[in-house]
Amino acid sequence: MILVREALGSELRRRRLAQGRTLRDVSAHAKVSLGYLSEIERGEKEASSELLYAICAALDVPLSDLLLSLGREIAAAEASAEVLAAA
């Protein structure tokens, strides 16, 4: 089963690390607590749309770009699951 919060958290972490940024830096720019951002990245907490927008702004990533990437990742996971189920 695909959990959107886990896929979203992984994508946010990937993008943050690709920029060489720390959780502390992004949390300060997004005005979200360090612990909460960490929980979002680990897929433990759901981010509201407002919070997700703030995190994307802090990462200088368009929300639409993040969501499109997330959609492609989920579609690939679904296709893989369907192939396994058909085997």
Image (spheres, grey):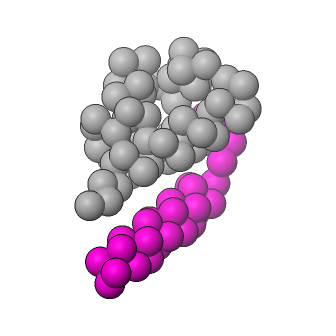
Q: Where 64 sits versus 52, above or below?
A: below
* The C terminus lies in quadrant: bottom left
Query: Closest to the observer: 76 or 35?
Result: 76
Q: Is residue 34 magenta?
A: no
In x, y percent, where is residue 73? 51, 63
Q: Is residue 19 left or right of residue 39?
A: right
Going 54% across and 20% down the picture, which residue do you hit? Answer: 23
Query: Closest to the observer: 66 or 62?
Result: 66
* The N terminus lies in quadrant: bottom left
Q: Which residues are magenta?
A: 58-87
- Residue 50 visible in the snapshot: no
Q: Is residue 85 magenta?
A: yes
User: Which corner quadrant of the image does residue 83 belong to?
Assistant: bottom left
- Residue reaching furthest bottom? 86
Going 63% across and 40% down the picture, which residue do you hit? Answer: 15
Q: Where 33 sits versus 67, above or below?
A: above
User: Which corner quadrant of the image does residue 17 belong to?
Assistant: top right
- Residue 20 visible in the snapshot: yes
Instruction: Label the magenta part by its dominant secondary structure.
Output: helix
Q: Is residue 8 left or right of residue 61?
A: left
In x, y percent, where is residue 82? 36, 79
Q: How many marks?
A: 0
